[in-house]
Image: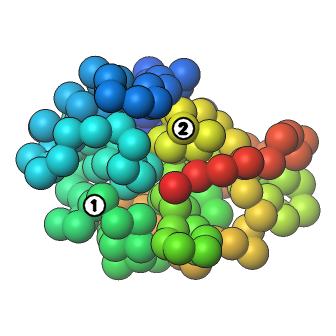
Amino acid sequence: MTELNYVAIARRDIGLREIKGPKHAGRIVEMLCKLGAWWQDDETPWCGVALAAWMKEAGLSYPKAYYRALAWLDYGVACGAQYGAIAVLSRKGGGHVGIVTGATPNGSHVRLLGGNQGDAVSEAWFPVERVSAFRMPEGVAKAIPAPVAALGDLSRGEA
């Protein structure tokens, strides 16, 4: 399977972590600047920031309120849990977004590549019951099944 360009771009940031305290991760601050954000810290929830930065670098659109995870509910084209889909999750106090990179054989969980997963860019597993929508960017809406994988460690925190 050929990797989608925005997935490849996102993978380059795996391991990027926010820095607690007065210092901030340069790459996250760079994302904020390129998107024209009015804040410059890495402790404000940044899952939507990372996703928008990857989309922008790939030449794709992103929501005006990209920094709000739930703003991605209306993004692109509705789809299922397929490779490259943007999963929009609900959680107490807001939401979370990430890119689908895998699914369990029974479809109960999806693996998401996203920012601010445990304060870092990582791949983590989430129950499908938390997903409010799966969306594909305009022009990338062809169905690509998510690679099937054994369930790994579940996400322990995202903001």
Question: Which amino acid, by three-letter code, is at mark 2?
Answer: Asp
- The quarter of the picture where residue 5 lies is top left
Compared with 146, 86 (above or below) is: below
Ranked by sequence position, the earlier of labels 1 and 2 is 1
C-alpha gap between disc 1 and disc 2: 18 Å
Mark 2 = which residue? Answer: 119
Q: Judge from the rendering whether residue 111 lies leftward or rightward of residue 153; answer left or right.
A: left
In the image shown, does 60 or 144 lie closer to the viewer? 60
CB of mark 1 within 8 Å of CB of mark 2? no
Residue 68 in view, yes or no: yes
Q: Position of residue 109 (x, y in %)?
A: 79, 59
From the viewer's perspective, tell me whether residue 95 is left or right of residue 29: right
Q: Residues within 10 Å of mark 2 (few under 14, many from 20)?
A: many
Residue 79 percent across, percent down from the top left: 53, 72
Residue 66 numbered mark, or none: 1
The residue depicted at 20 percent of the width and 29 percent of the height is: 30
Compared with residue 20, is residue 70 higher up or lower down, i.e. above or below? below
Q: Which mark is residue 127?
A: none
